[in-house]
Image (cartoon, coloured by chain):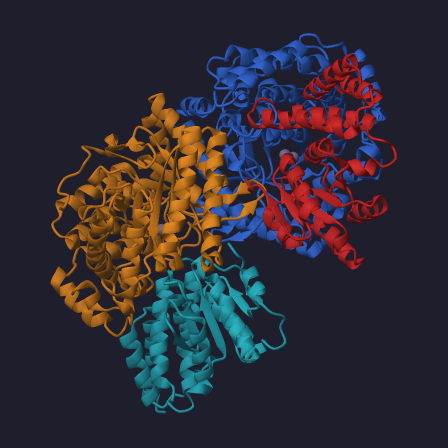
Chain colours: A cyan, B red, C orange, D blue
Amino acid sequence: MTQAEDVIVSKQLARLKEAILNGDVNTAREAATILKEKGLLPLDIVNQAIKPAMDEMGKRYERLEAFLPDLVLAGEAAQEALKVILPKEGEEAFIKGKVVIGTIYGDIHDIGKNIVAAILSANGYKIIDLGNDVPPERYIETAKKEGAHIIGISCLLTPSMYYMRDVIRKLEEENIRDKFYVIIGGAAVYPDWAKEIGADGWAKDAERAVQLCDTLIERGKELPKPVILGEWR
Amino acid sequence: MTQAEDVIVSKQLARLKEAILNGDVNTAREAATILKEKGLLPLDIVNQAIKPAMDEMGKRYERLEAFLPDLVLAGEAAQEALKVILPKEGEEAFIKGKVVIGTIYGDIHDIGKNIVAAILSANGYKIIDLGNDVPPERYIETAKKEGAHIIGISCLLTPSMYYMRDVIRKLEEENIRDKFYVIIGGAAVYPDWAKEIGADGWAKDAERAVQLCDTLIERGKELPKPVILGEWR
Amino acid sequence: MPFRELAYENAYELAFGFAKKPLSYGLGLSVGDGKVIPEVKYLLKPGLEQNLNALVEEYKKVTLSIMERAANLGVTDVQLETEFVEPMTMNPSWGAAVIETQKEVLSTYYERYGIRSALRATIADVRRFSKGLRKGEYFQAIMDSFINAAESGADLLSIESRGGQEIFSYSLIRNDLAGMLFSLGILAPRDVRYIWKEIVKNAKRAIPAGDTACALANSAMVLANGLVNRKIPHTLAAVIRAMSAVRTLACYEEGAMGPGKDCAYENVIIKIITGYPMSMEGKTSAFAHSSLVGNVVAAACDLWSNETIVVEDTFGGKTPAIIFEMLSYDTALMNESIRSRNNKILQQLFINSDKYRDPQALILSPDNAFRIASAIVSANSDYERTISAALEAIRIIEDNLSILNMPEIEKRYLATLKNFFEAVPDEHKLIEESIKKYSGKVPEFNATNYEL
Amino acid sequence: MPFRELAYENAYELAFGFAKKPLSYGLGLSVGDGKVIPEVKYLLKPGLEQNLNALVEEYKKVTLSIMERAANLGVTDVQLETEFVEPMTMNPSWGAAVIETQKEVLSTYYERYGIRSALRATIADVRRFSKGLRKGEYFQAIMDSFINAAESGADLLSIESRGGQEIFSYSLIRNDLAGMLFSLGILAPRDVRYIWKEIVKNAKRAIPAGDTACALANSAMVLANGLVNRKIPHTLAAVIRAMSAVRTLACYEEGAMGPGKDCAYENVIIKIITGYPMSMEGKTSAFAHSSLVGNVVAAACDLWSNETIVVEDTFGGKTPAIIFEMLSYDTALMNESIRSRNNKILQQLFINSDKYRDPQALILSPDNAFRIASAIVSANSDYERTISAALEAIRIIEDNLSILNMPEIEKRYLATLKNFFEAVPDEHKLIEESIKKYSGKVPEFNATNYEL
Ligand SMILES: [Zn+2]
Ligand SMILES: [Zn+2]
Ligand SMILES: [Zn+2]
């Protein structure tokens, strides 16, 4: 790389980082495209711009210098950049894992699930979002078809909690319970519910959902389940 | 019996009934003694004085013409009369059943248990009262020794509820679960708790505890358990 | 018939226990006529909706536990709300059986102890955006449920309708103010008007009572969370509440008559406009969700509710009976203040104990709610009303900035809000842009659901 | 040192949030000094007392959930009460570990958000009548628990001592008034004095706070039940409450300094006599038990409590955090009334909304509590005080018969009560007769437990 190109690259890295922090999808896409054209490796772009931006946003959020939508928008800008820089083939090598996510049957409150999906995806997970009101079977069909690592079930309404159990029961019936980690969350479900239905994890909020997925993917086999991250309110 | 004696008998029956209604133990004992000396059969005394008196008291209580202590005192007077008229030998023939009763370990609130004991006893049950703070084993030892039909466990304090379950578990371990009906009650335990621990019955209050014992003794074998009498508040 | 004027001359006139248009219904109940009445709501644990007999039996027990508590406490006026869960709504005859049984219990207590009572049936909005909001199996199930509930003796009919929720959920977590305005100012009122016209038609002897922006403004309130754990700006949640009053008002313009539903915190504004009695919930709804408006909303209530509580047997009795006891002491306090003519003082205490806790409390304080209500009735369309409500809420927060204890980031956000609402596109343009923007991007969004 | 005078000149002087002798303790907390503070109590589900780590962890979670809610609601003053269950009391080091952990959490919130707080440790009275009330393993466990709790940072020490309960339980359900008098007027005060002398000795840096007639008067209150399901006369329950004030007062005469414990409804009377701040509970304690005095007792409170709630995770959060939210809105209302100098009006509303509901509410109304307090301090011994309290309570009920809505049977019972208390034996005679009467008959009764 020439020195002039070096300057362009570091300018665009800064621009990408800034675009992510601003949740500016278009600028993020542009900067990422230039960086790719300049021949930067995807991993370098991730490590030098995308990850630092998301970490910075996480800190701002914690310090109440940003709100949750800022986090979601940053995540979407980061995702856009990732889309540009990741090769179509072998994309798998760059993702931490695949998560099938949805709000359980009978429940149409999707805000929590949407937040988790956005944040997970910004943190390197490939998300297959089934939407709301998802029947138990659909999680399983999709997880099998997509070769997912994690099934994430959200539930805001107490009466729907019981359908979560059905997902796990059906996995057991099909003898594929150990093929997927099942994680649960949402206003209706507390840590003990994860234990009761035999889920693999529970997280208090979207940020902890990322940690939860990381933990399960990295050393899920050795840990006692469920893994509980955060305190019930 | 002469006509004069006839008059004495019916006078003393009325006196006994009145004494029970007044909770007057001494008069009840006197009247019962006279009736016994006059050769009246125990069953006649029960049917003509004791039972009508207790029924009448039950009605008064229901109509809020009497309070619970009136019921307890009447029960004690009735018991005193029964003590006089029942033969030492063959007493068994005159009692409906034997109930081992106590407030469970860790709980020293005995008011509810005392009420139930008094009312059951007035209604023809022989009561073996273990007092308060009774360890699970003691119910079983005593029930075996006394040849009891029913084990009654009372519990006012939530933290002690779990010891109730131990009574049933220990019965099962000894393979004598079907030798006794286990009934539970007290402010801490609601109907579902009876179901959860596998008890045979739950009653809302002392009066229903009598009905519950009657029901179990008469047709306990055929009924689905637990038998629930009354509504949780 | 649009409201063009306020039912109240000024904020001071607004009182708890008194509505300009009181209602009489049920077993001798009078609402908004000089007293505040406890309204208790409960949610059965899941599982029972599989078996009609068990379901009816459980509702009967709940009703008995509440009425027995009322008798034991000497409470003379009681309202119950039965919120249909989805399976009950999908099987309208089940809901009917529940209502009938509950009303029988209420009659017994009316005859035996003279306890006046009524039953509100809240039908679940089971509609799926993908399957049509205005027709089809789900829509029909709702209407059949209303008809059945009314025929079985329900005194009041309510729903938490969800029109606009698909766009709202999407835009709220992306801070997409145009999306929120599209949802609250265009989609939601259109849906409310449509569904309430139908409900009013089907109400029969029951009173079409009212709707709530639960799916919208309460989602924002829950995300806003507390003073420490705020996930979205509280200024935004407050402005959304003000805006949501327009869609809730629409049901009354289509024939609903009150009492409004408890979880519609915007009811303070609605009462000022309509004069209808309102049910409200505050501190006692903490089993359903936390809020920063536990006292202030009592200032305008005619019924005082707990939002909901999961039915369980506990030490102190059945949970609905327990929470009813708490409500009844609160209403006893309010009613004693009315009797002794101290109600304006008590009302002021309710207001001032919350008013400056949070912008959400600030804008629901009667004086400020009055300003928002005035802004709403002065505007012409639902869309303009929604913008006016937002702008007025922003102005109210600005006017009180010095006394509100808010972090800097909230103050900066308020400027963002103001900039947006001062330069909104006109209605047609927003519709056009939004349809283009959200079609495809929000899979559940379908403009034909709103005849757009 | 016996109280011979009242701390208050008249009933009107009595106020919530103000005590004649305010206290400062804990992390910056001032009690009875111009505001009412929420005091929240919780009961773990059984099972955890088997494992120290799990137990400590669970109490930590409970404490976190409450403090986080306080921060989110902007509540600045909080008191927690940890009631030791039996296994915790029997293992004093466990209680110490719990207290220490809880205090750490409180410190964090004090430093991070400036929330002032304190922790009350209530030790279980695990004594067995058959094994000695004044010595032995159980007595020692209690004292060790007090010492450990104080050393680990508990700010307040309390107990619900049970002296006299054996005779009370027996006599209450037999309407044996002499037995009740023996229990409340002789046994209970003797036990309270003995155990509190010991507690005061062992309190170290903690404040010996106060006792409650929970095992006695609250048993009667629970049996009295509601207006419909009354199992014992409410006139009796009311008179028992008045009598029970004498045994509770005894702890303050032995060195306890308040704040008195929440479930001592007799604290209205105690506050008038001692001037110490008092914790009280009313409507919000419905998860523990129903009562007919949900509002009236707030008239004299300095801390406002929920009695207890079983810890569970629910929809709205952990139950202690939920009930804390409710308490905090009630205290916010009271504190706003103090700020705006409307507190006498609000107090009167609390009083009048309950006063004539039931004789139990009537005698706890400040004016009547003042009469009972005066009767108590004018008498000479605990025994005579108890009789005076009963007679004054009877007179109060008689004075209000026409306005109290009581069934005939209650009125007849009142005459029975009056006849008894107007012709009671002298103390020595009652002791002699009672020892004779109950020895053997009440197996748990042992006169040496009271050095009689
Ligand atoms: Zn709602
Ligand atoms: Zn107690
Ligand atoms: Zn207590």
Q: Quadrant of the C terminus of chain C?
A: bottom left
Instruction: State the residue lying farthest toward the top.
Output: D423
Instruction: State the residue lying farthest toward the right.
Output: B89
Q: Is residue C450 above or below residue A139?
A: above
Image quadrant in which you'd find residue D336:
top left
Q: Is residue D121 above or below residue A156?
A: above
Q: Is residue D195 above or below residue C133?
A: above
Q: Is residue C398 above or below residue D196?
A: below
Looking at the image, which is closer to me, D262 or D185?
D185
Residue B54: x and y in percent read 67, 27
Looking at the image, which is closer to me, C400 or C119?
C119
Residue D262: x and y in percent read 59, 32
Image quadrant in which you'd find residue A138:
bottom left
- At 54% from the left edge and 11% from the top edge, which residue is drawn? D398
Looking at the image, which is closer to me, A84 or C294?
C294
Q: Is residue D416 left or right of residue D140?
A: left
Residue D370: x and y in percent read 55, 15
Query: Number of callouts in the render?
Result: 0
Q: Is residue A144 left or right of residue A68?
A: right
- At 62% from the left edge and 73% from the top edge, which residue is drawn? A223
- Residue D121 shows in this picture: no
Residue D450: x and y in percent read 81, 24
Image quadrant in which you'd find residue D81:
top right
- Residue B171 shows in this picture: yes
